Image (tube, rainbow, N blue to C red):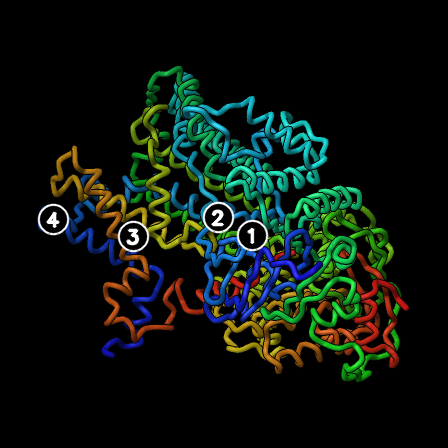
Amino acid sequence: MTTTPRWRALTHHHLFWPVAVLVLLLLVNVPFTPDFFSIRMTDGHLYGSLVSIVLFGSPLILVAVGMTLVIATGGIDLSVGAVVAITGALACSYLSDQTDQGALSGVLLAMALGLAAAAVCGLWNGFLVARMGIQPIIATLIIMVAGRGVAQLITDGQIITVNSEPYKLIGGGYWLTLPFSIFVVAAVVAVTVALTRRTALGLLVESVGGNAEASRLVGIRSRRIKIMVYVFCALCAGIAGLMISSNTSAADGNNAGLWIELDAILAVVIGGTSLLGGRFSVGGTVVGALVIQTLTTTIYTIGVPTQTNLVFKAAVVIVVCLLQSPKFRAKVFGARRSGAKGGGTPDTSPADAAPAPEAAPRMEVS
Amino acid sequence: MAEPQPVLEMTGIVKEFPGVRALSGVDFRLFPGEIHALMGENGAGKSTLIKVLTGVYSLDGGTITLDGESVRFGSPLHAQHAGISTVYQEVNLCPNLSVAENIFIGREPTRWGRIRWKQLRREAAELVDRLGLDIDVTAPLSAYPLAVQQLVAIVRAVGTGDSDGEGSGTKVLVLDEPTSSLDRDEVLELFRLMRRLRDEGVAILFVTHFLDQVYEICDRMTVLRNGAHVGEHPVGELDQVGLVQLMIGKALGQLEELHDQQLHADVGEPFLRASGLGRTGAVAPFDLEIKKGEVVGLAGLLGSGRTELARLLFGADQPDSGTVTIDGSRIPMHAPNDAIAAGVAFCSENRRTEGLVPELTVRENIILALQAARGWTRPIPAAQRDELVTRYITALDIRPADPEARVGRLSGGNQQKVLLARWLITRPKLLILDEPTRGIDVGAKAEIQKLVVSLSEDGMSVLYIAAELEEVLRLSHTVGVLRDRRLVARIANGPDITTGRILETIASGEDQ
């Protein structure tokens, strides 16, 4: 046994594998872009690959953070991409009707309108899932499909462009030398962590996702909690929608946030939150989203042909998922890791496997 | 009957699951033209035996002989082709299809790949008619109540044998608790059909929890206990008391008295009163009063409705009749929240599926009920939380004494203690314990029983459910006896109350 306790504690930390993958992906870029890690100052703004990864990854991080809570309750939200489109469309179409697009009050109102629409979408999802008992994947499919139509209606099928300095700030501006969106992301992540860990919300969400029937019998009002997380998730998507439309100064009902739900789900999974619900990690999700954004960047920098970049992405994702699976690691690195048994590896512990045989002969339920 | 040949003979049947021997050398015989009851408590191996017979499970040992030929079924379909048809407790039909389609589903009469609808309907109508039923086969199944759907399932099962065998038809019909959700008239209708089939020579294997029904319709019975065959008797030769003794494996007269009166005598004001509380298919309407500081024990065979009764008192299932009054005010019982707010706590018998959240820690599981009552915006302050958790881990001797341990990894006894701790920190007024000592070691068992006594001394009411009658008697001021999903007696505990007396009540259904 050469592994020291400290090393073991490190490798068994829930963020170890996501971070390891992220670092590895970043390093892959160095041979292709030697100054990959360098950050330089131009016109009082910081530039560099790392900054761009965070900047372009901001909407994904936001959406994925909201998705984390939904997945933790055992649900899923496919509608976030459409919510991104609706929010951007509503905010931009309101703004473009203003005579003075630069007025702060108009911009704030446009953003409030967009976010209100997002919240309504979230309420609808939560209502269908928690009140009507519709499976989350079906319930949220409704807005996923219909939402883009709504966005098209708002923009009359056009791409609406706006020309507003204050609005441009959210997704494309700089503040204290850094892209402003990084501050938005940091604020949302901080609020989410505070909301879930400073209050009991996180515990109740994990309980509902971990064992819904036990949660009901312990008196948790799981409907309320579910509605709340769907609204929260939609609001996160809404902020991402503002960010995307702000970055391009345009609302594109068709393409804004297209397929972002899939990347977000992937980010949550890479971050170590199980799709079955229960334990979640907001930090893990942020790392997961950064992994995906880095992967996208890497694909461009190492010059994978455009036709094959989805295949390349898929291959990397498969490797990442396999690396995260304790079962796979046990198989591949089995000999080396056998000594670490019982040290806190997630899932597949003998205690978890035990109930199956116990349950078998109790088939008789009256 | 002059020694006819059994149509079905199972000899030395063994079925093992990892770590458990579900059936150890069970013999079972079934004669043509008889209704044969398979009796036993839950977990005795009835369902396993049926599943081995019908090819759902493979056989680990023993032989099955059907009509003198040794058989071994690889799948339910295989068994069906050989003439063994099964109807399960839940109706497995398609409500959106017509009755005729349901009867012939999967074996529709066809010509050149096309279904011959006219023939299908005609044959279905003939079959229904022959069995003396009045059902329109063209109507969708969903148009009929559950009881009729059950009859259709039987018609389908009988019909399966008819058209598939070489004229042999269904030889064996297995009915696994078909009556559990039927009312009295519907049961009579079912029995009429069963008698008719029996008279046609079909051998019927009938599983039910209702003792009265066994004596009403069956000719013979086989009793299983803990996966072993403990008796085969003509119904007339074994009375209900004898049957119950066989099922639970204890003779009424010979029971050792373990009755130590450590209970305090005085119980206070009424705390909870249920009147006419009931739920169709779960437990018949009952009246029950629980006083402050009183321990009410529930006795009855497994499946007699003990758990169902407890769940109604907690609002885990919604009652469809009756009212619950707690401390003088009526409680709506729409959801567990209502009961919890009134001071009722419920430790389910299914610790893993209805109690704990396995991937959360001991600490999180312990504070869950209290936190749920406070709402998510008011987290329990960390210092107070840690103090509470440590106190209860110590008081109940939960091992490992690590609040960060994942609850799914604890042993059964320790998981039970975590559940108890979860509710005790909410300071409930009534604690419902459903099989709190099941599957845990002797030491933990004694600790939990001691705890119940001391809680009751402190004025907490307890509703205590356990399979062990001695346990119920030792702890309870009052014993409620359930039988066939009915609360049949409430017996005030005293020196002259013995387990034998309770067993007699369970067997006879009346309080002598």
**x and y percentages locating residue B150 in the rendered image:** 66, 41
User: Which mark lies nearer to you, 3 or 4?
Assistant: 3
Judge by depth and name the residue closer to the eye, B90 or B203.
B203
Establish whether labels 3 and 1 are both on one chain. Answer: yes
> Residues under labels 2 and 1: Cα distance?
9 Å
Using a 10 Å C-alpha cutoff, classify the residue at mark 1 as few (fewer than 14 neighbours), some (14 to 19) or many (20 or more): many
- Mark 2 and mark 4 in contact? Answer it, CB < 8 Å: no
Which disc is residue A61 wearing? none
N-term-proximal mark, 3 vs 1? 1
Q: Is residue B257 visible?
A: yes
Give the image quarter of residue B167. Answer: top right
> Residues under labels 1 and 4: Cα distance?
50 Å
Which disc is residue A212 wearing? 1
Amino acid identity at mark 3: Cys
Which residue position is annotated with label 4?
A35
Using a 10 Å C-alpha cutoff, classify the residue at mark 2 as few (fewer than 14 neighbours), some (14 to 19) or many (20 or more): many
Give the image quarter of residue B161. Answer: top right
Which residue position is annotated with label 2?
A74
Amino acid identity at mark 1: Ala
Relative to residue A54, is residue A140 depicted above or below? above
Amino acid identity at mark 4: Asp
- Mark 3 and mark 1 in contact? Answer it, CB < 8 Å: no
Q: Is residue B342 visible?
A: no
N-term-proximal mark, 1 vs 4? 4
> Residues under labels 3 and 1: Cα distance?
27 Å
- Mark 2 and mark 1 in contact? Answer it, CB < 8 Å: yes
Viewed as shown, does residue A129 lie left or right of B309?
left
Judge by depth and name the residue closer to the eye, B190 or B477.
B190
Amino acid identity at mark 2: Gly
**x and y percentages locating residue A355 in the rendered image:** 49, 65
State the quadrant of the C terminus of chain A.
Answer: bottom right
The residue drawn where x is 48% and y is 46% is: B77
